[in-house]
Image (cartoon, rainbow, N blue to C red):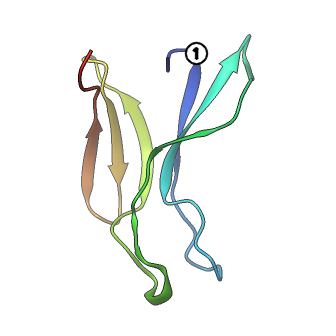
Amino acid sequence: AYQDGVFIAQHGSSNRTIFSGYKVIYVPFTEGRPSGEMQDILTGFVADEDRGQVYGRPVGVAAHVDGSLLVTDDSGNRIWRISRTGD
C-alpha cells in the first residue's frame, strides 16, 4: 500500500501558537505526482502543547531492507522503527 508514494518527516514548529508538524506522513503518488490525501503514519510527539513540551521531533525517514521504516528523532535522540504486524 505504501510503495508508490513518499514518507515525510515533519520536524515541527514550536514558535507558533498551535504546534504544527511533529509527525511522519505519507503522500501517495501516481505517475510521479501527488495523487491523494496525506496520511498520518507516526504521531504522538507532542506531550503538552500548553507547556511547549514534546517527546521528540522527527527529522528523516529511510526504508530498511526488511521493509520497516526508520525515523530519526533529533530531540528524543532516538531512531524509531515502524514495522508491519500481522498478515
Q: Position of residue 20 (x, y in %)?
A: 60, 65
> In the shown orientation, is residue 36 left or right of residue 9?
right
Q: Residues within 10 Å of mark 1 (few under 14, many from 20)?
A: some
The residue sitting at 30% across, 24% down in the picture is 64
Please provide percent x and percent y for residue 24: 48, 46
Is 60 situated above or below 44? above
Decide: is 65 above or below 75.
Answer: above
- The quadrant the C terminus occupies is top left
- Give the total number of marks visible in the rendering: 1
- Give x and y (percent) for residue 19: 58, 72
- Toward which corner of the image does residue 78 lie, by quadrant? bottom left
Q: For numbered disc 1, what is the local secondary structure?
A: loop
Q: Residue at x 65, y 83 (%)?
A: 17
Q: Nearer the viewer, residue 52 or 64?
A: 52
From the top left corner, tell me how far across and down residue 77 is, in percent.
26, 60
Q: Residue at x 48, y 80 (%)?
A: 49
Q: Residue at x 59, y 23 (%)?
A: 5
**Does residue 72 lie above or below 15 as drawn?**
above
Give the quarter of the image for residue 32.
top right
Amino acid bearing label 1: Asp
Q: Which residue is mark 1?
A: 4
